[in-house]
Amino acid sequence: MDCSYSYFIKLTCTFLFIFVVPTTSQNSKCPFQYLYHFGDGVTDIGNSVRVFPWGRSLPATRLPYGTTFPGTPTGRWSDGLIDFDFAAADFGVPQITPYLSRNASSSNGVIFSVARSPVLDHNFFKSRGVKIPPYAVPLSVQLSWFKTHLKSICSTPTECADKLGNSLILMGDIEGNDIGYPLTQGKSIIEVQTYVPYVTRAQISATREVIKMGAKLIIIPGNAPLGCYPYILTALPSNDPTAYDDLGCLKSVNDLITFKNNNLQQAINNLSREFPNVSIMYGPFDEGVLAVLAETSTDGNITLKACCGIGGKYNYDSKSFCGSGGVPICSNPDKYIFWDGLHLTHEASARIERILIQPALSTLNCTS
Ligand SMILES: *[C@@H]1O[C@H](CO)[C@@H](O)[C@H](O)[C@H]1NC(C)=O
Ligand SMILES: *[C@@H]1O[C@H](CO)[C@@H](O)[C@H](O)[C@H]1NC(C)=O
Ligand SMILES: *[C@@H]1O[C@H](CO)[C@@H](O)[C@H](O)[C@H]1NC(C)=O
Ligand SMILES: *[C@@H]1O[C@H](CO)[C@@H](O)[C@H](O)[C@H]1NC(C)=O
């Protein structure tokens, strides 16, 4: 069963979309059979909307989410597919399911990602006066979901290690919310910078755990350039033109992200020394997003605006979020990078896949 994405065959794909991910490129054969992903809304394919009891009233349960593909909401925080859908198809592991759907134990790709989730636990933020929504599932809890899932697919540590040794683990992108929540709630860049070592340590310790269970191949994506995102640009307006870079992104926020991503890369290097037989790679997600933004920056009207949203310079207002009554969507989502102010459009995800994932296939020893 194969299914290329085009508007022409949209209906056929819609029917199959749970099992067969449409792709613009040929499936590749990679040296792994299973795919596990921890993360946030960038890679959530239907967990947040299933988190009881809050999930069923989240925006992603309603149109216009899913309007471009498949035409109905799927639980993805996008007008269509997300990076992971394209990546899974590239990797030749197209049967991916969200952990909270019933079929997770029978599929070879399970997503633990939950939209709006941070790396760090609720207590960390509570002690600093930062509010996190109740449906968020921090990395430590996603990791416990993973352990529960393992129990359903293997019964001894050796058997589980064999399965994990035959898997690609994607540990993130998830840390955007550890930075986004405090920044949009008035914490200074200097203060948020002090959170970075905690975030990195938590990501590394989760990675170490999956390695000890048998994982041999891991990608830890860095954080997106949040200084370009409509929700951050709206929350931290500046009258000083020098606060913005050529693309119109907030320099101070992107500097913080670069600091964070550098810290993560150092920690990954350290972890690689600790486990010389495990392949642990950094994924430059920020470069992918910046490249897509640079390609689009000739149209200043849409580069940094949300397609689905209303209000302000960036078409974003947290009180009139995409999916609420009376919030319009743009007529051409495929021209936009940002879907709802926090997440990317289907088209932007497809372009990031071409920029980041396709070139990485040879590094992962995948063959067409
Ligand atoms: C679960 O899998 C079964 C058999 O493979 C399929 O018939 C059913 O539609 C699936 N359900 C979901 C929610 O994906
Ligand atoms: C990496 O290891 C070096 C040397 O042990 C240490 O100084 C540094 O703090 C570590 N970096 C991170 C981010 O863990
Ligand atoms: C790495 O692999 C080699 C060859 O398979 C093995 O001899 C060695 O003990 C392994 N090292 C670690 C740290 O697991
Ligand atoms: C941006 O929008 C304004 C007003 O709608 C329009 O006049 C202008 O041509 C647009 N700029 C671009 C680059 O499309």
Image (cartoon, rainbow, N blue to C red):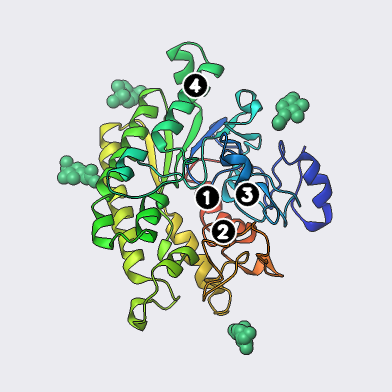
Disc 3 to disc 1: CB gap under 8 Å = no
Look at discs 2 and 3 and give the one toward the viewer: 3
Of the residues shown, which amino acid type is indicated by label 1? Val
Of the residues shown, which amino acid type is indicated by label 2? Leu
Q: Quadrant of the N terminus?
A: top right
Question: In the rendered image, is residue 28 in sight?
Answer: no
N-terminal of the pair, mark 2 or mark 1, is 1
Kindly identify which residue carries mark 2.
344
Question: Is residue 141 toward the left or the right of residue 2 in the image?
Answer: left
Kind of element beneath mark 2: loop
Classify 103 as above or below 239.
above
In space, the residues marked 2 and 1 are separated at their CA atoms by 8 Å
Residue 148 image label: 4
In space, the residues marked 2 and 3 are separated at their CA atoms by 13 Å
Of the residues shown, which amino acid type is indicated by label 4? Thr
Where residue 125 sits in the image (x, y, percent)?
A: 33, 45
Kind of element beneath mark 1: loop
Q: Residues within 10 Å of mark 2 (few under 14, many from 20)?
A: many
**Residue placed farthest to the top in the image?**
156
Kindly identify which residue carries mark 1.
42
Q: Residues within 10 Å of mark 4 (few under 14, many from 20)?
A: few
Kindly identify which residue carries mark 3.
60
Q: Residue at x 49, y 66 (%)?
A: 230
Q: Residue at x 58, y 62 (%)?
A: 320
Where residue 352 sits in the image (x, y, percent)?
A: 55, 58
Kind of element beneath mark 3: helix
